[in-house]
Image: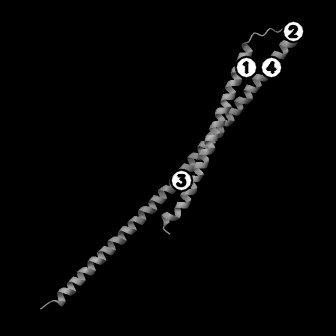
């Protein structure tokens, strides 16, 4: 088996690995988008609720309103941390994809180098065979010329 053929399984595995990482990155990006959308919803809701002019008729209602606003703000902060974590995860996956892509590219270059070397060996072999054939014909022609001599 030629060197270039021996590297093909490694190339296939590198491609599969790169594809798996690309799928994981796409999933992480979808998750990030969902978290960002949820954060935006929470922010809008908290802002709308804070700006609404609900008539509070008692101190207890005012306290409940303030407590609810605090919980909303806490939810916004937690979701913001979730978005930040999700962004970090996306960046990690991007880095992994870049590394997998580089690994595959190195293997592709190695395979191309092997194939080029194999082509050169084949070309030299073919040239030797042609040279040998030409030399044999020349010898046969020379022998035929000697045998047909005076």
From the viewer's perspective, is residue 19 above or below residue 7? Answer: above
Give the distance between the C-alpha atoms of the residues marked 3 and 1, in whole angstroms: 48 Å
Residue behind mark 1: 46
From the viewer's perspective, is residue 109 above or below residue 133? Answer: above
| Disc 1 to disc 2: CB gap under 8 Å | no
Quarter occupied by the C terminus: bottom left
Q: Position of residue 131 (x, y in %)?
A: 29, 75
> Tag 2, which secondary structure?
loop
Colour setup of the view: one colour
Q: Is residue 124 left or right of residue 15?
A: left
Residue behind mark 2: 58
| Disc 2 to disc 3: CB gap under 8 Å | no
Residue behind mark 4: 68
Q: Residues within 10 Å of mark 3 (few under 14, many from 20)?
A: many
Question: Residue at the location (71% across, 32% down)?
Answer: 81
Q: Is residue 85 left or right of residue 103?
A: right
Residue behind mark 3: 104
Give the distance between the C-alpha atoms of the residues marked 4 and 1, in whole angstroms: 9 Å
From the viewer's perspective, is residue 68 above or below residue 31? Answer: above
Give the distance between the C-alpha atoms of the residues marked 1 and 2, in whole angstroms: 22 Å
Which mark is on residue 26? none
């Amino acid at each position: 088996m030629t060197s270039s053929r021996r590297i093909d399984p490694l190339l296939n595995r590198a491609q599969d690995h790169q594809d798996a990482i690309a799928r994981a990155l796409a999933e992480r990006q979808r998750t990030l988008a969902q978290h960002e959308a949820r954060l935006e919803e929470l922010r809008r809701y908290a802002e709308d609720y804070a700006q609404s002019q609900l008539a509070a008729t008692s101190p207890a209602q005012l306290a409940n309103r303030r407590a609810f606003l605090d919980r909303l703000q806490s939810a916004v902060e937690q979701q913001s941390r979730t978005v930040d974590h999700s962004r970090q995860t996306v960046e990690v996956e991007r880095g992994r994809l870049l590394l997998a892509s580089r690994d595959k590219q190195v293997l592709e270059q190695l395979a191309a180098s092997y194939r080029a070397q194999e082509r050169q060996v084949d070309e030299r072999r073919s040239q030797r065979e042609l040279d040998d054939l030409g030399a044999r014909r020349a010898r046969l022609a020379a022998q035929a010329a000697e045998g047909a001599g005076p």
